[in-house]
Image: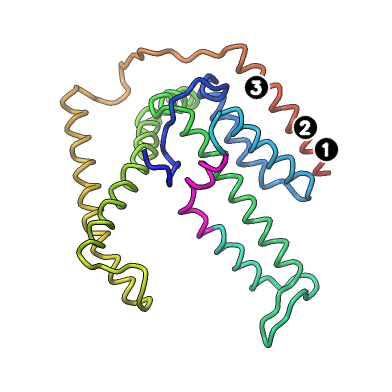
Amino acid sequence: MKSWLVIGQYVPGHSVLHRLDPRTKLLMIFTYVIIVFFANNTLSYGLLAIFAIWTIFLSKLSLTYILKGITPIWFFIIFSFLIHLFFTNDGDIIWQLSGLKIYSGGLVKGLTISLRFLLLIMVTSLLTLTTSPMEITDALENLLSPLQKWKFPVHELALMLSISLRFIPTLMDELDKISKAQASRGVDLRTGSLKSRMYAVIPLLVPLFISAFRRAEDLAMAMEARGYRGGEGRTKLRQLSYSWLDFQAVVIYIFIMIIFFMLRN
């Protein structure tokens, strides 16, 4: 398993997070994603950061492993920070050089957006790290089951989301192999002008797309060979059930969210 990318990977284990019902984890992460955008001061952001680190500790996964595993995302976090830092003109000027000015509002907004992005990636990564793709599919299908009354393809949607998450690390591994193969043939992706780098990416993208379509075709043929015909009439080998651990987790989570809104106000 590649250690440089954690998004979409599943790490088997027996931690508290691994033993939680996948529906509980989905609901908690969904509400966390929404609540992050309500933070408006240092205390509220601090509580959200402590909660994220605490859940990583409960998963028995290394914080360094997760931070290193989201390396591809760091570019977007830093880019977002720089955009707000140099193009937001709110507040007082804290640094100036020639025509370049940095305002206090831009610094605060850049830090805020970057921290939100980092917290969201860290917490959502825990879902796939501690929950198998099959469990995610069953949980999504169960939570969205009321939509079946309106003929909504719940099973198909849950399956597509689960397959998409599962194929992220697979495609990244494939991209790593292709880039090493191209580098051994003299393709340089790290030096030269921007235009030459863009042209050098083409030998990576073409075989990557071909490999992705081939994998999708193989998966479709395998599903058809096993008689897959959608969710109609399907039964499940493993039935989801809430436990006392889920109840405790929900109570603690609600208590933390109450504290969050108190700190926010």
- If the image is split into quadrants, where does the N terminus sit? top left
Question: Horizontal placement of 12 versus 192: left or right?
Answer: right
Point out the tag, 1 or 3, that comes first from the N-terminus.
3
- If the image is split into quadrants, where does the C terminus sit? top right
Q: Look at the picture and state if 214 lies above or below 95.
A: above
Q: What secondary structure predominates along the stretch shown in magenta?
A: helix
Residue, disc 1? 262
Instruction: Say which amino acid is labelled 3.
Output: Ala
Q: Look at the picture and state if 98 lies above or below 248.
A: below
Q: Position of residue 210 (x, y in %)?
A: 20, 52
Q: Nearer the viewer, mark 3 or mark 2?
A: 3
Do the CB atoms of the residues marked 1 and 3 lie less than 8 Å apart? no
- The residue range painted magenta reads 63-76
Instruction: Say which amino acid is labelled 1.
Output: Met
Magenta highlight on residue 188: no
Q: Mark 1 and mark 3: span between their CA atoms?
A: 20 Å
Mark 2 burial class by Cα count in 10 Å: few <14, some 14-19, many 20+: few
Element on which disc 3 rests: helix
Which residue appears at 64% of the width and 66% of the height? Answer: 84
Mark 1 burial class by Cα count in 10 Å: few <14, some 14-19, many 20+: few
Q: Mark 1 and mark 2: span between their CA atoms?
A: 6 Å
Which residue occupies the extreme front position in the image? 184
Q: Look at the picture and state if 246 lies above or below 86.
A: above
Residue, disc 3? 249
- Tell me which corner region of the image, top left, top right, bottom left or bottom right, holds residue 249: top right
Mark 3 burial class by Cα count in 10 Å: few <14, some 14-19, many 20+: some
Element on which disc 1 rests: helix
Q: Position of residue 144 (x, y in %)?
A: 48, 27
Question: Horizontal placement of 41 versus 16: left or right?
Answer: right
Residue, disc 2? 258
Q: Position of residue 102 (x, y in %)?
A: 71, 74
